[in-house]
Image (cartoon, helix red, strand yellow):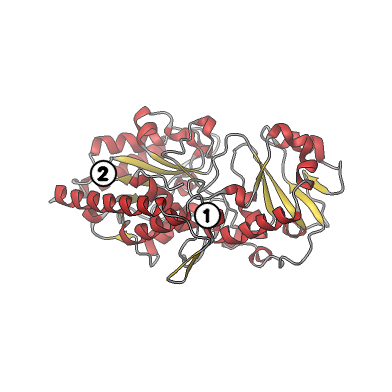
Amino acid sequence: MQRRAENKLEQGLARARATILKAASAANPSIIIKNNDIISPAIYWNPSAFYQSYKEMERRFKVYVYQEGELPIVHDGPCKDIYSSEGRFIHEMEHGNNRFKTSNAQAAHVYFMPFSVTWMVKYLYKPNTYNVTPLKAFVSDYVKLISTKHPSGIELKELIILCFLAMTGYLDDFYAIYLVLLMKCCLFELLQGPKASQGNAFLYNTSIRVLCNANSSEGFDPTKDVSLPEIHLYGGIVNPKLISPPPSNISRPDLAFFAGGIHGPIRPILLKHWRGKDTDLHVYEYLPKDQDYYDSMLRSKFCLCPSGYEVASPRIVEAIYAECIPVILSDHYVLPFSDVLRWEAFSIQVDISEIPRLKEILVAVSEDEYLRLKEGLRAVRRHFLLNQPVERFDMFHMILHSVWLRRLNLRVG
C-alpha cells in the first residue's frame, strides 16, 4: 500500500512537471489575468511557468504535521521579533486554514516536525556554556518518539543521525524547522546559518536547506537550497508607516539612506567613504535622535542594504515595504526567491569595489529607470508580506513554493 501511495505521488509530480514545462515554453504575455490573479511579468524570469507551478503547488502539494510533542518547544515559536519567520511558519502549518496540511501521512510529499530551535535555545541552552547536549538530547528524544509512533515513515537510524548532527553547529546558526522529504529521505531545514548542517556530508549533500544566511561562499547551493527573506516583526506587525507608503507622485528629497551598526566586512567600507561625506547620501552608524528610521526610508529614493556579519539583511524587505529601491551591497548573497524573481526589475546591486562610486552610480539612474524599478517594487511587495491569515502569493506561500520546486527537482527561471 505504501509503494502504491508513493507511486501515485510520483505520478502526480510527473504530471505537474509536464504542465509547468509546457507553460515555460509558451510565449509570455505582457500581463497574466486569470481567475482574478494578476501577474506582472516584468518581475519574473518566466511568468507563465511561475504561475503554472504555483497553481500545481496549490493543487497537489501536501505536508503532514506531526502532532507529537509538548509546548512550549514543540507546536510554537516566536512571532514578534527578528525570528518571526519560524514562529509564523509553525503557527500557519499547525493552525492555519491552508490547503497544504494533510492528516493522511501517505498522501504527504513532505513531513513537518514542528519544534522551534529558537525556543530550544531559550529554554534549554545556558548562555556562554557552549554546551549543546540538552538540545541534542531533546532532538534525539523527539525523533525517537515520532519514529516509534510512525515506524513506516523514515528509517529511524538515518533520521536520528540527521537531527543529531544538525544540532552540532554554532548556536548563532540555530534557527531551524525540519521537514523530512518522504521520497528522498532528506531533511529540509529552515536555518539562520548554514554551519549546522556542514558537520555531516550526507546531511549537507542531500538536504534542502532554507537559509536566511544564503551565502554561496559558505556552501549554499541554489540548485537545491532555498534563500529565506529576513524580516523584523517587532510587536508581531509591520511598522504602520510601511503599510501604506507615499504615492508615486510624492517626491523623495533624499537620494539614499542607511543607518546601522558597523560589523562584517562591508559596512566599514560604506561608512568610511560616505558617513557624513555628502548631503545627498544619508549614511549613519547611529541615527540622530531627531530622526525616525522609517521616515528616513520613506524620504529616500534608494535604501542601502549592506551585509553585516551575515549576507542577509532585513533592510531589503523593509525597503520593499517602503518602496525605496534596495541597493544591495553584498558578496555571495543568493537573493530570496531568485529562482523565479528577477531582482534587477526592482533593485540595484552594486559591487563592493564600486562603493566609492556609489553616488555616481545612483545619480546615473534615469527617471524612467527609477519609475520602472518603483513599479517593480509595487508588484513584488505581496511576495514579501507575512499576512495573518495568509494570502495567496505571500511570503508563506513563496517559501512553500521554493520547497515545492526543489521537491519537483525543477527550475522555472
- The amino acid marked with disc number 2 is Met
Q: Position of residue 195 (x, y in %)?
A: 48, 33
Q: Position of residue 60 (x, y in %)?
A: 30, 58
User: Residue at point 59% right, 43% down?
Assistant: 312
Which residue is disc 2 drawn over? 183
Helix, strand or loop under label 2 = loop
Residue that sits furthest to the front in the current view: 27
Q: Is residue 295 toward the left or the right of residue 161 in the image? A: right
Q: 344 or 280, which lies in front?
A: 344
Quick check: can you spot residue 147? yes
Helix, strand or loop under label 1 = helix
351, above or below 118, in the image: above
Q: Position of residue 332 (x, y in %)?
A: 57, 34
User: Residue at point 24% right, 45% down?
Assistant: 147
Which residue is disc 1 drawn over? 84
Q: State which tag comes first along the sequence, 1 or 2.
A: 1
Quick check: can you spot residue 73? no
Residue that sits furthest to the bottom in the current view: 36
Q: CA distance from mark 1 to mark 2?
A: 29 Å
**Pointer 1 local density, CA inside 10 Å: few below 14, some 14–19, many at least 20:** many
23, above or below 211, in the image: below
**Pointer 2 local density, CA inside 10 Å: few below 14, some 14–19, many at least 20:** some
Label 1 vs label 2, nearer the camera: 2
User: Residue at point 33% right, 60% down?
Assistant: 101
- The amino acid marked with disc number 1 is Ser
Q: 399 or 237, which lies in front?
A: 399
Q: Position of residue 41 (x, y in %)?
A: 53, 57
224, above or below 71, in the image: above
